[in-house]
Image (spheres, grey):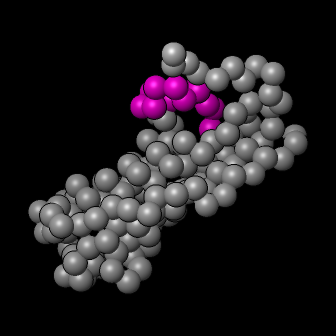
Amino acid sequence: GVGMVAVSGKPVVKRTAVARGFIRMASATVGQLLERSMAKGDVLTTAQLAGISAAKRTGDLIPLCHPLPLDDVRVELEVVGDGVRVEATAVSTARTGVEMEALTAVSVAALTVYDMCKAADSAMVIGEISLVSKTKEPL
């Protein structure tokens, strides 16, 4: 069967997770991003907000994910080489980890970049989404 993991016996600690991803695109698209000349507007800021919003809704999006109160979510996007690097950090004081929140933030931020740039470049590739670190520290 399928079911959530019972976490009632786990300690409440400060948990932090960092995830990263990359969206590769044509050099002309990178140029438009740097010039802030995309038709849909400020891509990086919009994607940052989308990632933060997505992290907060992870429990609604992933069926077996516990809804968590988030203490902090940071999403950073940087134009690097042939695309955009996305990094998200999620922090929660909870009984279970925040990897899924960080990974969801990265994924949705990257999808938002894709959505806002697809008219200019439909061959973009989203990839290399991974968990970089997860830590927990006692309160």
* Corner quadrant of residue 92: top right
The spot of residue 87 in percent (x, y) is 52, 62
Magenta stretch prevailing secondary structure: loop
User: Seen from this angle, which residue lies furthest left?
Assistant: 119
The residues colored magenta run: 59-70
Count of labels in the image = 0
123, above or below 139, in the image: below
User: Seen from this angle, which residue lies furthest top?
Assistant: 1
Q: Can you see residue 111?
A: yes
The spot of residue 70 in percent (x, y) is 62, 38
The spot of residue 8 in percent (x, y) is 76, 19
Instruction: Look at the image and tell me in which quarter the C terminus lies.
Output: top right
* Corner quadrant of residue 9: top right
Q: Is residue 60 covered in magenta? A: yes
Q: Is residue 5 covered in magenta? A: no
84, above or below 134, in the image: below
Taking the image as shown, residue 90 lies to the left or right of residue 109, namely: right
67, above or below 119, in the image: above
5, above or below 30, in the image: above
Residue at (77% x, 42% y) in the render: 14
Q: Can you see residue 49?
A: no
The spot of residue 5 in percent (x, y) is 64, 23
User: Seen from this angle, which residue lies furthest front?
Assistant: 1
**In the depicted view, which residue is nearer to us: 103 or 1?**
1
Taking the image as shown, residue 20 lies to the left or right of residue 11, namely: left
**In the depicted view, which residue is nearer to us: 119 or 40?**
119
Residue at (69% x, 33% y) in the render: 96
**In the depicted view, which residue is nearer to us: 61 or 49?**
61
Residue at (61% x, 61% y) in the render: 132
Residue at (63% x, 32% y) in the render: 69
